Amino acid sequence: MTAAALPPSPGVTVRAPAKVNLHLGVGAPRPDGLHPLATVYQAVGLYDDVTVCDAPEWRVELVEPDPSVPLDDGNIALRAGRALVEHHGLDLAAEIRIDKGIPVAGGMAGGSADAAATLVALDRLWGLDTSDTDLLRIAAELGSDVPFALIGGTAMGTGRGELVEPLADATDLWWVVVLSDDGLSTPAAYRHFDELHPDAPSEPPHPDALVAALAAGDVAAVADRLENDLWAAARDLRPDLVEVEADLRSMDPLAVLLSGSGPTLLMLFGDVDAARAALADVTALGHRASIAPGPVAGAHVVHYG
Ligand code: ATP
């Protein structure tokens, strides 16, 4: 990883995972304009590493600069740092260095991972002992996917996705994550969902069969029950994804799934060898792809001092 090429710096490094939605049930927009969700999150093995250290002023930098990631208050990691300091009534600042391994704007919640990692890293750096309840509440205010990035594993998400409950998951899944060169705006995907589904329920149904299959460790049943309500909207907004989807289905995965609001697509396999073979095939077709196991842990310290 590129971070290894940089001189070691004192501070705390926290690693936070990307997420996929094994189920993304979307309801009709609430009065506040946000969509009620019934979603099953799974943390998968693509990570951002966030390193924090004391600084006279807030500052965020990327190990590999990316013009699509803001370095001002638009960066959700910076907002997380300020929110934690405000919660404790402190006057502290930090430098936040982000080493991104999660695709940007890919529907895998990379920004949310950075926010969760920043909360944990600063809590440890300054010995704040923030309670789990408070961390989850601050996380929920930052963004709907941030609480899940804290807990990781596999979890049910309700509300707008911010209310998370860990789920029993006895599966061992292998994902081939297929990236897209062009982005797909999350608000645009939800707007088009509203156009396509004027009769969406106010409470999307709970995915009971998927939850049972996960607990039983039944990978075939999990594959049959993967679902994403945003898929039709994503296909309309990005017709090129239909062709990619056909390429992926020809590789005989257990399932193909749109990741969150897309445009990243996922192939599911039950073992790493099958995933490796598909990775070689999909790469030979010219797609950018990588392998990620799931479920994995949420934000956790990997370096201290
Ligand atoms: P969403 O949470 O909107 O579904 P996503 O998971 O598809 O997003 P992210 O990688 O989180 O994708 O980025 C969404 C947008 O958030 C980016 O285009 C970028 O402008 C902005 N952003 C703010 N902070 C960050 C960050 N730390 N990392 C990545 N993007 C960030």
Image (tube, grey):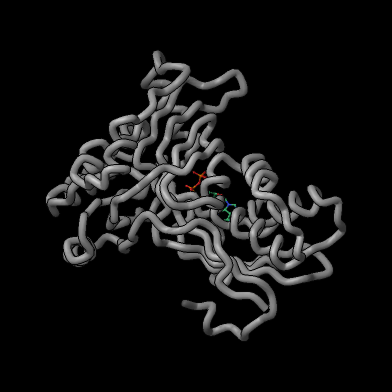
Q: Quadrant of the C terminus?
A: bottom right
Residue at image position (39%, 13%) is 199
Which image quadrant for residue 233? top left
Please tell me whether residue 114 is drawn above or below residue 49 in the rendered image.
above
Which residue is more in the foreground, 76 or 162?
A: 162
Q: Position of residue 37 (x, y in %)?
A: 47, 30
* Residue 230 seen in the current view: yes
Q: Position of residue 112 (x, y in %)?
A: 56, 50
Which image quadrant for residue 201? top left
Q: Position of residue 191 (x, y in %)?
A: 47, 28
Residue at image position (36%, 21%) is 196
| Horizontal side of residue 71 vs 210, given as left or right | right
* Residue 73 seen in the current view: no
Q: How many marks?
A: 0
Which residue is more in the foreground, 98 or 113?
A: 113
Please tell me whether residue 68 is drawn above or below residue 125 in the rendered image.
above
Residue at image position (39%, 42%) is 21
| Horizontal side of residue 154 vs 56, given as left or right | left
Q: Position of residue 100 (x, y in %)?
A: 51, 65
